[in-house]
Image (spheres, rainbow, N blue to C red):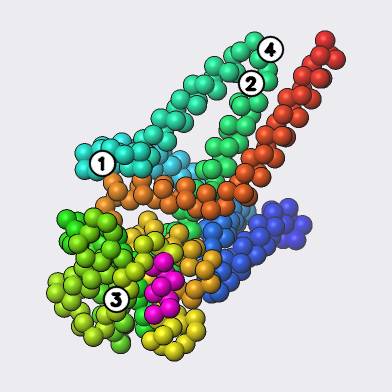
């Protein structure tokens, strides 16, 4: 066995798998409010997949399993990828139509179709630039940079998506003595809409599942077009519509932003509990909760988040907005990478032109 090269190939896939899983599990146990959660989760899944398939190839070579098993697996993976791609493509069209019909025709709500339109247009432009005569070689830098840029943004999006999904799954059974429901705009000045109502319902239901009910802080100030503070409307909804004890509710009616929601609520919790850095759970929409968790970590708050479900047609463009906001929060790091890639490609083009001219 030790003389079989496959043994060492499997070994060198298992070792990184163990390393990745160790880091991933450590992040879960310490603080999952980080994009590293998705990054190491993806690495772990990749090396698990590689290790399993190398093991199958090894066992096939030893005659333990028939070759048909590998063929079936390959066909399943290819078909699964094709079906997934078709479903995603159709889903994008369907959900974009729903957004167009049910929401305002703002740029924010049309991010998904606009993104694909931009990619399509850039593809056409890149194709035209590639066919330009040699005197326009300097423009061809774009054809080198653009694919790298797309792959970079795509990787960042996959990491953000994976982090959000894993984080949401981890927080499903989280418990605390204090809950904070993050506010959102009211309808007709004093009515709770579906999006905000969903947050309240998840918080109340989650509290009811605990052995001891949580003190729920409803956090939200009063906007210029609102008749009452969001916090008041939220508490009324929880008490009157869901029967939650009013004695277990607290109002935070001064905040205007997510930052203020978290900070002001944290101060109230510390005053009530007489504990500095007291743990609490906050509740927001599913698409927003992970970015809010990243924000809470930056603020040094001992807070984790749980998301409430939203309609798919609204969730997709909202999730893209969250991703853009996360990119913007780390814009210096991303800008440095893009400048590095641009300089590298300029040098590559200059070097290629130099070699071409000397060869001629």
Give the number of the disc on residue 104: 1
Which residue, given by chain and number where applicable, does mark 4 sit on?
A: 134
Residues drawn in magenta: 260-268
Q: In the rendered structure, which disc, 1 or 3, sits on the residue that comes first in sequence?
A: 1
Q: Position of residue 92 (x, y in %)?
A: 33, 39
Residue at (55% x, 74% y) in the render: 30
Q: CA distance from mark 1 to mark 3?
A: 31 Å
Q: In the rendered structure, which disc, 4 or 3, sits on the residue that comes first in sequence?
A: 4
Q: CA distance from mark 3 to mark 2?
A: 58 Å
Is residue 49 in view from this perspective? no
Which residue, given by chain and number where applicable, does mark 3 sit on?
A: 251
Q: CA distance from mark 2 to mark 4?
A: 10 Å
Which residue, given by chain and number where applicable, does mark 2 sit on?
A: 139
Q: CA distance from mark 1 to mark 2?
A: 38 Å
Q: Position of residue 291 (x, y in %)?
A: 45, 59
Q: Nearer the viewer, mark 2 or mark 4?
A: 2
Mark 2 lies on a secondary structure that is helix
Q: Nearer the viewer, mark 1 or mark 4?
A: 1
Residue at (49% x, 63% y) in the render: 294
- Please identify the quadrant where the C terminus is shown: top right
* Magenta-colored stretch includes residue 266: yes
Image quadrant assignment for residue 169: bottom left
- Please identify the quadrant where the N terminus is shown: bottom right
Mark 1 vs 4: CB contact within 8 A: no
Which of the pair 218/61 is nearer the observer?
218
Give the number of the disc on residue 303: none
């Amino acid at each position: 066995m030790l003389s079989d090269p496959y043994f060492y190939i499997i070994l060198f896939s298992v070792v990184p798998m163990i390393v990745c899983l160790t880091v991933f599990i450590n992040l879960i146990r310490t603080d999952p409010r980080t994009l590293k959660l998705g990054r190491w989760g993806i690495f772990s899944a990749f090396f698990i997949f590689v290790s399993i398939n190398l093991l199958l190839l090894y066992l096939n070579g030893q005659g333990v399993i028939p070759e048909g098993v590998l063929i079936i697996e390959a066909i399943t993976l290819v078909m699964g990828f094709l079906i997934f791609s078709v479903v995603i493509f159709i889903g994008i069209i369907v959900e974009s139509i729903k957004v167009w019909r049910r929401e305002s025709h703002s740029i924010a709500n049309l991010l998904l179709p606009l993104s694909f339109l931009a990619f399509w247009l850039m593809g056409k432009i890149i194709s035209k630039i590639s066919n330009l005569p040699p005197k326009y070689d300097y423009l061809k830098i774009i054809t080198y940079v653009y694919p790298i840029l797309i792959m970079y943004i795509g990787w960042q999006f996959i990491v953000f998506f994976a982090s959000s999904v894993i984080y949401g799954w981890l927080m499903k059974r989280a418990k605390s003595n204090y809950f904070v429901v993050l506010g959102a705009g009211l309808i007709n000045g004093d009515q709770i809409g579906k999006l905000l109502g969903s947050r309240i319902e998840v918080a109340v239901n989650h509290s009811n599942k605990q052995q001891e009910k949580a003190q729920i802080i409803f956090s939200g100030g009063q906007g210029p077009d609102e008749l009452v503070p969001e916090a008041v409307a939220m508490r009324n909804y929880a008490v009157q519509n869901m029967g939650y004890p009013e004695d277990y509710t607290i109002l935070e009616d001064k905040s205007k932003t997510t930052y203020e929601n978290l900070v002001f609520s944290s101060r109230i919790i510390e005053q009530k509990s007489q504990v500095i850095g007291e743990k609490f759970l906050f509740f927001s929409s599913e698409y927003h909760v992970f970015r809010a968790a990243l924000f809470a970590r930056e603020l040094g708050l001992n807070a984790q988040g749980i998301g409430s479900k939203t309609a798919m047609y609204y969730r997709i463009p909202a999730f893209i907005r969250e991703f853009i906001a996360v990119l913007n929060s780390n814009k210096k790091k991303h800008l440095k990478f893009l400048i590095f890639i641009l300089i590298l490609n300029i040098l590559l083009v200059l070097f290629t032109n130099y070699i071409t001219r000397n060869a001629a």
